Amino acid sequence: MPEGPSIVILKEEAWKFTGKKILNVRGNSKIDQARLADQKVISIQSWGKHFLLCFTGFTLRIHFLLFGSYRIDEEKPDTDPRLSFTFDNGELNFYSCSVKFLEGDIDSHYDWSVDVMNDAWDAKKAKAKLKEHPNMLVCDALLEQDIFAGVGNIIKNEVLYRIKVHPESLVGKLPSKKLDELIKEARIYSFQFLEWKKQYELKKHWLAHTKTWCLRCNLPITKKHTGAKNRRSFSCSNCQILYA
């Protein structure tokens, strides 16, 4: 599943279509595609893992789920697009994704202050929301999109390794300073993820995700599906403290 930084990259790549009129729309999506014909793209935005094409009076939301993808100015061989747009300056194609119309003002649908990569990000609000869930595991908390929109499993694993917190720690047991560190690193790592992804070297910088050996302790990394979300966690039982 693409994480927030990957959607920001798509937003930047697709920016050239801002102000452009859709000349042709096709695909196997069941939405009312005729509604999009001749519409002008007013703006292109992202919120967490959502890619947003904004038009007058409505927005098209693209969610890539687990296996979604996109291509700009080229098609994916032997694969029908979920939606394909033709503009006078190129083509935008989406595959294996969820598409949905959002009616009215886009600001009525999203709280931009919970998006870790948005200028409106509010760390204090994130901390207040975390304190409302003292019995939640931190591995689940980092994946809560209404707290950390855009954070996915890679960011989760890397942040927890950096701040030396075990993924099965309880939010309510973390010291206040450690909670602040968690929130701060979620944003810092997201922007580093963005830069490394642009340079095609993201995996080179992974310290914990998919790793088998702890670089700090020279001990095995434990791989385990953790939390209510049952996502893969990679952690060191020696240096990542279990707050429970």
Image: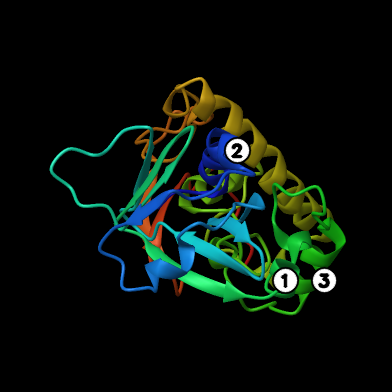
Q: Amino acid at mark 1?
A: Asp
Q: Nearer the viewer, residue 119 or 57?
A: 57
- Spatial separation of the CA atoms under disc 3 and disc 2: 34 Å
Q: Can you say which quadrant of the picture contains the C terminus?
A: bottom right
Residue type (three-letter) at the residue carrying disc 2:
Trp
In the displayed structure, does residue 134 sit left or right of residue 180? left
**Given contact means CB atoms under 8 Å apart, are the residues at marks 1 and 3 in contact?**
no
Disc 1 residue crowd, few under 14, some 14–19, many 20+, Cα 10 Å:
some
Q: Which residue is mark 3?
A: 128
Task: Compare residues 130 and 117 and report the one nearer the observer.
Answer: 117
Between 12 and 127, the residue placed more toward the observer is 12
- The circle drawn on residue 15 is 2
Say which residue label 1 marks.
Answer: 105
x and y, in percent, of residue 51 in the image? 54, 54
234 vs 106: above or below: above
Q: Residues within 10 Å of mark 3 (few under 14, many from 20)?
A: few
**Which of pointers 1 and 3 lies earlier in the amino acid sequence?**
1
Occupied quadrant, residue 185? top right
User: Separation of disc 1 and disc 3 at Cα?
Assistant: 27 Å
Q: Nearer the viewer, mark 3 or mark 2?
A: 2
Alpha-carbon neighbours of circle 2 within 10 Å: few (<14), some, or many (≥20)? some
Kind of residue indicated by mark 3 = Ala
Pinpoint residue 74: horizontal percent, then vertical percent: 31, 33
Lower position in the chain sequence, tag 3 or tag 2: 2
Name the front one of labels 1 and 3: 1
Residue 148, numbered circle:
none
- CB within 8 Å, label 1 to label 2: no
- Residue at x-position 56% and y-position 48%: 4
